[in-house]
Each structure stands twice: as C-alpha cells, then as structure tokens.
Image (cartoon, rainbow, N blue to C red):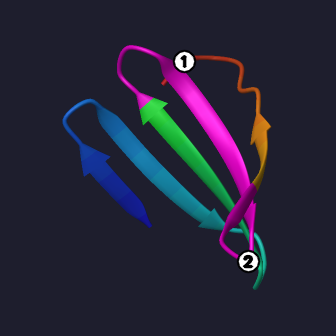
Amino acid sequence: MTVMADDGALYVLPLCERIVLDVLAYEDEGLLAFIRIDGEVVAELPVLGQA
C-alpha cells in the first residue's frame, strides 16, 4: 500500500502476517524506515540514499 502526501509518500510493505516494513519517503529529508510487529514500532532503520 502507498499513501501519497504533498511532501512525500508512505510505503507499507508486509513482510509476513505480523511484521510490516514502513518506508517514509520525504522530498526534502530523504528516507526513514520502521519495523512494526503487531502494529507496534520496534525499530527505526537507517536508510542510505535519497527518495
């Protein structure tokens, strides 16, 4: 699933039934990634590169 906003996008990538990878792509700030397990954020991951 992708959600677009004026300043970027949120990509929601299900890895399995309970685990989801969220990637926030901002026009100005680059990329942020988060791992969610059962809906709760458990880790923020560094992302190299730009959106």
Query: Label 1 is placed on what type of residue?
Result: Gln
Camera-nearest residue between 41 and 50: 41
- In the rendered image, which quarter is residue 49 located in? top right
- Identify which residue is drawn at 50% across, 40% down: 24
Numbered label attached to residue 38: 2
**For residue 40, side relative to residue 29 (left or right):** right
- Identify which residue is drawn at 76% across, 27% down: 46
* Callout 1: SS: loop
Q: Which residue is mark 1?
A: 50
Pinpoint residue 34: horizontal percent, then vertical percent: 69, 47
Magenta part of the protein: which range?
A: 26-41
Which mark sits nearer the N-terminus, 1 or 2?
2
* 4 up-or-down from 48: above or below: below
Circle 1: is it few (<14), some (14-19), or many (20+) Cα within 10 Å? few
**For residue 41, side relative to residue 22 (left or right):** right
Pinpoint residue 7: horizontal percent, then vertical percent: 26, 30
* 40 up-or-down from 44: above or below: below
Pinpoint residue 10: horizontal percent, then vertical percent: 44, 49
Query: Label 2 is placed on what type of residue?
Result: Asp
Pinpoint residue 50: horizontal percent, then vertical percent: 54, 18
Q: CA distance from mark 1 to mark 2?
A: 28 Å
